[in-house]
Amino acid sequence: MANKKVLVVDDQYGIRLLLKEVFSKDQIHIYQASNGKQALEIIQKEKPDLILLDMKMPGMDGLELLRRLRKFDTEAKVIMMTAYGELDMVAEASRLGALTHFTKPFDIEELRSEVIRQLAS
């Protein structure tokens, strides 16, 4: 898993911190963005292998970011995170290429094993 890059995009600092901590044991490079604009800058510069993307953020939400991502022709895999059971948004995210989604509060080990599985494939 060394040299793999994961970008965590979430407006909640606590979530970003938690995920950075969880993946530090796996020697995965973690990048953090608190909003869509920041995320786009990191994506263009660092080319992450996987993006953990919060659906609800102020300004550019997760779906808008996902739409823009697809225009860059990025290879990055995307896993959505949402605090809401919004099935229409989840369906839209799937159409835009998101692999799966986790509803907050998520099981951290479940999320970790899915991320590692995706990075390995």
Image (cartoon, rainbow, N blue to C red):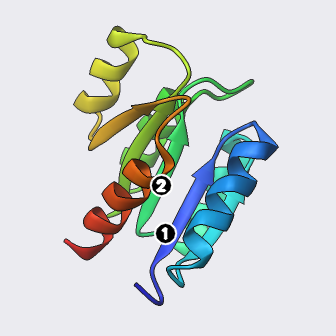
Q: For residue 13, what is the image quadrant?
A: top right
Asked if one can make out residue 71 in the rendered structure from this viewpoint, the answer is no
Q: Nearer the viewer, residue 24 or 39?
A: 24
Residue lying at the far bottom in this picture: please name it: 2
Q: Nearer the viewer, residue 7 or 17?
A: 17
Q: Nearer the viewer, residue 97 or 31?
A: 31
Q: Amino acid at mark 2?
A: Ile
Q: Residue drawn at (59%, 64%), measured in percent from left and top?
A: 22
Where is mark 1, residue-wise?
Answer: 48
Where is mark 2, residue-wise?
Answer: 51
Q: Residues within 10 Å of mark 2 (few under 14, many from 20)?
A: many
The picture places residue 21, in percent across and down from the top left corner, at 67, 66
The picture places residue 73, in percent across and down from the top left corner, at 34, 58
Asked if one can make out residue 103 in the rendered structure from this viewpoint, the answer is yes
The picture places residue 24, in percent across and down from the top left corner, at 61, 76
Q: Amino acid at mark 1?
A: Pro
Q: Residue drawn at (26%, 31%), measured in percent from left and top?
A: 94
Looking at the image, do the residues carrying marks 2 and 1 touch, with CB atoms under 8 Å apart?
A: yes
Instruction: Give the vertical position of 25 relative to 14 (above or below).
Output: below
The picture places residue 85, in percent across and down from the top left corner, at 43, 12
Q: Which mark is residue 15?
A: none
Q: Residue drawn at (35%, 21%), measured in percent from left and top?
A: 90
Badge 1 marks a residue whose secondary structure is loop
Q: Residue drawn at (34%, 60%), measured in percent from left and top?
A: 113
